[in-house]
Image (tube, helix red, strand yellow):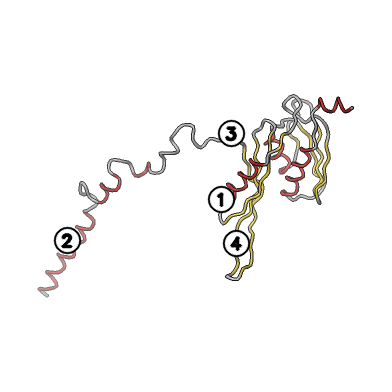
Amino acid sequence: MEDSQKIEPNKQNGQNQKGGGQNRPGGFGGQRYGNRNPNMRGQGRQGRPGEGESEFYEKVVQVNRVSKKTQGGDKRSLSVIVVVGDKKGKVGVGLGKAADVQSAVAKASTYAKKHMITVPLKDNRTIPHEVYFKLGAAKVLLKPAPKGTGVIAGGAVRVVVEAAGISDIVSKSLGTKNQASNVYATLQALTLLKHKNFIKKSG
């Protein structure tokens, strides 16, 4: 009984020594953080002015899970479609595949920026003429609209025309409701647009 009574205080002292190291000046806690606030870690780069800002408008249209069968088992990844535009007449669409969403979006955004098209705008607000395009099961009709009309379009078409900087337009998706198909059909329809000066010369 005497031995057990002697050991218990030693255990308590050992526990106090383990916990007390963090509170002592120059202990583990002091060496790790110093005079810095632990809650401010990771905010240094975000606080710098001018960093993290992008001149492009980016919108994720669709995220799909992809599974590929391999010898070692199923390899799962994510497929992401991103629309990128400067809202000044340039727009692009990119497809990215990766194990996580962030990497897939980065790949798709990089591809879209490298393959942007220039859309001719009338008065910097609408398209110069009506255009119709069919891509597979997707059918897209785009019409110019007077000032103040706004963007009358479905989800996929709206994303593309807004990224291009079109503020007045009327559109109809006559075929499939698949978001990816409508995005690519809209992009191809915009490539068929001709500037109003070219239309006058050819006419």
| Image mark for residue 103 | 1
Q: Amino acid at mark 3?
A: Glu
| Image mark for residue 55 | 3
The residues tagged by marks 2 and 3 sit, at their Cα atoms, a distance apart of 61 Å
The total number of labels drawn is 4
Mark 1 neighbour class, 10 Å CA radius: few under 14, some 14 to 19, many 20 or more: some
Residue identifier under label 2: 13
Left or right of 82 in this view: 141:
right
Write the residue at 17% across / 61% down. 13
In the rendered structure, are the residues bearing label 3 and label 1 in contact, judged by CB atoms less than 8 Å apart? no
The residues tagged by marks 1 and 4 sit, at their Cα atoms, a distance apart of 14 Å
| Image mark for residue 92 | none
Q: Amino acid at mark 1?
A: Ser
Residue identifier under label 4: 76
In the picture, residue 170 is in which quadrant? top right
Circle 1: element type: helix
